[in-house]
Structures are given as C-alpha cells and as structure tokens.
Image: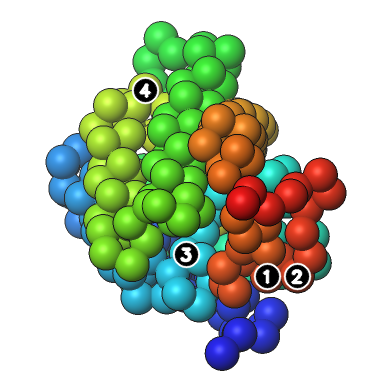
Amino acid sequence: MEESVGRRAAAEFVGTFTLVFAGMGAIAVGADLVGVALAHGLAIAIMVSAVGHISGGHFNPAVTFGFLVTRRIVPRLAAAYWAAQLAGAAVAALLLRGVFSPDSQLDGGVPVLGDGVGAGSGLLLEGVLTFFLVWVVFATAADPRGTFKSIAGLAIGLTISMDILAGGPLTGAAMNPARAFGPELVQWVWSDAWLYWVGPLVGAAVAAIAYDRLYLRPLAPAPVGPPETGLDEPRPGDTAVS
C-alpha cells in the first residue's frame, strides 16, 4: 500500500530525530571519536531498516536532493521531507538542550572546522564525504539490483561511521544539512554554517547524477520507481529496455 505524504514525512521526522538525538547525545556524554561514529552510524542503520520501506529512509536533505535532481522523487514530496528532516533535527537538539546541563559537552554537537582547516578545504571535505554516502544510498537503495531489502541499512550506517572516523576531527563530518542545522539553531552557533549546506548538497548531486547516468539510466526497466519514492510519472527521456 502506498503511504501518504504525511506518513512518509513522519517517518523522515522520526529518523532524523533519532540521528541527531543519538549523535549529539553521544557527544554530550563524552564519547570518543569511535563512539560518536558508531552512534551516528547505528542510528541511521536502524532507522533505514525500520522505515526505509515507508519513506526511503533519507533522513538527510542532501540525500533527498540527490533523489530530486535525478527525478526519483517529486518536488512536493521532497519539500515535505526537507521540512520534516529539519524539524526532527531541531526538536532532537532542543530536547537534549533541556536534558543536559549548560556545562556539558553539548556544544560539541555543532559541527565546526578543525584547527588548520580552512573554509575551502572544509567545503571540499564535506562534499567528498557526502558523495560517499549518497553513492552508497543509490547503490543499495535506488538500484533495483541493490540490497535494499537485506543490508542497505547496514551499508549506509557503516558509511556514516566511516566518514565520521575519517573526517570528524576535520569538519565534524556532518554530511547532512539537518544534522548541522538542529544543533546550530538550538545552540545559536552559526560558524561556517553555509558550508554544511553547500558541501553536502553539491556532493550529493554529483554522486546521484553520476550513479544514475552510469548504472541506472541504461537499465531503466521501470522508470516509475518504487512506491516509497513518490515518483508518479516516468522521467522525460526514459524508455523501457526490452
């Protein structure tokens, strides 16, 4: 049964809420880099496995943008996802702000550039890290030959953990405008906030278009796509391959 826009958006809200609550929570209790990477990765792996069949399990405006630029999600559904993702991140950060004392490490939940990392390098790093993430999302969840029904959640979650281990000390490895926005809004810290939008959105678009053109367009046996994408019509120029 095809889910309504509201139900899909609700799944995106819960998934993004879980990501920010688990990730910021791990930082607030003083987890090391490995602990923080696992908290984020497990949150995504669990939520993609739990509600991926409902919304596609984006939990990230950049992932949704990748589906939008490849016309695998309709604009009105993408807008609903973005609103739900940003709201979920903000509510999670606000709840944590109420739970932890002012002298906790909660401020560490706001992604910032590491020492010696300039804005240009940070932008490039966030773009590359997000490229890895969206490439894996498309390979496991969007590709009909992928592993969505078996290990997609695990693969996507492990990619998040890998990226944080590699880039956490350098940029915070947000890879997700919502993951940055929630803590920034609640803590009212906006240092280099723009690069946590531009980097992930550009990286996601490059990964999505590259995978779509290289591996999905030549196949195109079912351009309408799976129900959770919300794509109601074939993309212009798509033809079925006999």
Identify the amino acid type marked 3: Gly
| Left or right of residue 150: residue 73 | right
Counting labels gives 4
Image coordinates of residue 36 in percent, x first then y, are 24, 47
Looking at marks 3 and 2 on the same chain, the residue that comes earlier in the sequence is marked by 3
On the image, numbered disc 2 is attached to which residue?
232
Distance of mark 4 from mark 1, alpha carbons?
36 Å
Looking at marks 1 and 3 on the same chain, the residue that comes earlier in the sequence is marked by 3
Decide: few, some or many residues near mark 4? Use Cα within 10 Å; few <14, some 14-19, many ≥20.
Answer: many
Say which mark, if any, is on residue 66.
Answer: none
Secondary structure of the residue carrying numbered label 1: loop
Say which mark, if any, is on residue 230.
Answer: 1
**Would you place residue 16 above or below residue 141 in this image?**
below
- Closest to the camera, between mark 2 and mark 1, is 2
- Closest to the camera, between mark 3 and mark 2, is 2
Image coordinates of residue 128 in percent, x first then y, are 47, 24
On the image, numbered disc 4 is attached to which residue?
170
Asked which quadrant contains residue 44, the reply is: bottom left
Looking at marks 4 and 1 on the same chain, the residue that comes earlier in the sequence is marked by 4
Identify the amino acid type marked 1: Gly
Looking at marks 4 and 3 on the same chain, the residue that comes earlier in the sequence is marked by 3
- The colour scheme is rainbow
Image coordinates of residue 227 in percent, x first then y, are 59, 74
On the image, numbered disc 3 is attached to which residue?
57
- Closest to the camera, between mark 4 and mark 1, is 1
Distance of mark 1 from mark 3, alpha carbons?
13 Å
Secondary structure of the residue carrying numbered label 2: loop
Identify the amino acid type marked 2: Asp
Distance of mark 4 from mark 3, alpha carbons?
27 Å
The residue drawn where x is 57% and y is 45% is: 219
Q: In this orientation, does residue 54 appear?
A: yes
